[in-house]
């Protein structure tokens, strides 16, 4: 097993994006290319490979505003309300985890937790990140809770993706 962390501006292998597509976009019927985000070059990425096969991926990026995003598949992710208030200064720098995925045959082996920890640690080191935020698919909430994340607010539906809930973590 090899854990790789890729800093902003560094080149990612195509297979990294292939895994994102296979796990996160293809099951939704989304077209090829929807796995690419416009700010991928500004994000920190991490992945695990076994031999030469990438099996788990994820990314984390600085949040400039309130964390609301328009996704390439046409879904809208709502704001992280605590980042919208005047008291948000203690929460920043804030980062957002997105695009976490593990190939089905490698799930349940701890690879996603290793990717998530690498993202959190690298964001703290490189950006002095204070808090992390994410919009979790409902089925992924137990995973994130095991990794120290806390769900808050009500469930909501992300168009074309399904039910989600916001989560956060003090880093």
Image (cartoon, rainbow, N blue to C red):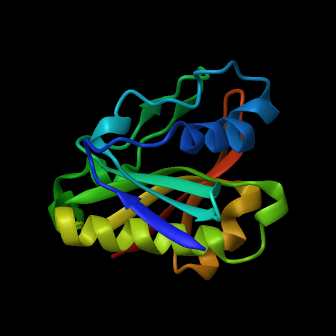
What number of labels is visible? Answer: 0
Q: Is residue 129 left or right of residue 134?
A: left
* Residue 9, horizontal then vertical, whole percent: 25, 41
Among the 4 quarters of the image, the one containing residue 41? top left
Where is the N terminus found, in terms of image quarters?
A: bottom right
Q: Name the side, left or right, on which 146 lies relative to 82.
A: right
Q: Position of residue 141 (x, y in %)?
A: 67, 65
- Residue 113 is situated, as x and y percent measured from the top left of the image, at 58, 74
Q: Position of residue 58 (x, y in %)?
A: 52, 54
Residue most extreme to the front: 51
- Give the side of residue 30 with respect to residue 116, left or right: right
Task: Give the quarter of the image for residue 130.
Answer: bottom left
Q: As displayed, is residue 134 above or below residue 37?
A: below
Residue at image coords 42%, 71%: 118
Q: Is residue 130 visible?
A: no
Q: Residue at x 33, y 46 (%)?
A: 43
């Amino acid at each position: 097993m090899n854990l790789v962390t890729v800093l902003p501006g560094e080149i990612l292998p195509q297979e990294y994006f292939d895994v994102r597509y296979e796990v996160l976009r293809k099951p939704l019927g989304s077209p090829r290319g929807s796995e690419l985000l416009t700010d991928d070059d500004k994000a920190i990425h991490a992945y695990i490979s076994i031999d030469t096969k990438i099996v788990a991926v994820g990314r984390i990026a600085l949040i400039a505003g309130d964390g609301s995003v328009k996704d390439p598949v046409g879904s809208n992710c709502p704001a992280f309300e605590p980042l919208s208030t005047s008291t948000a200064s203690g929460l920043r720098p804030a980062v957002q985890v997105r695009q976490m995925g593990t190939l089905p045959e490698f799930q349940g082996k701890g690879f996603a937790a290793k990717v998530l920890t690498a993202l959190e640690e690298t964001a703290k080191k490189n950006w002095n990140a204070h808090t992390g935020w994410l919009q979790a698919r409902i089925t992924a909430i137990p995973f994130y809770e095991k990794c120290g994340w806390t769900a808050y607010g009500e469930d909501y539906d992300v168009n074309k993706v399904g039910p989600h809930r916001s989560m956060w973590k003090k880093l």
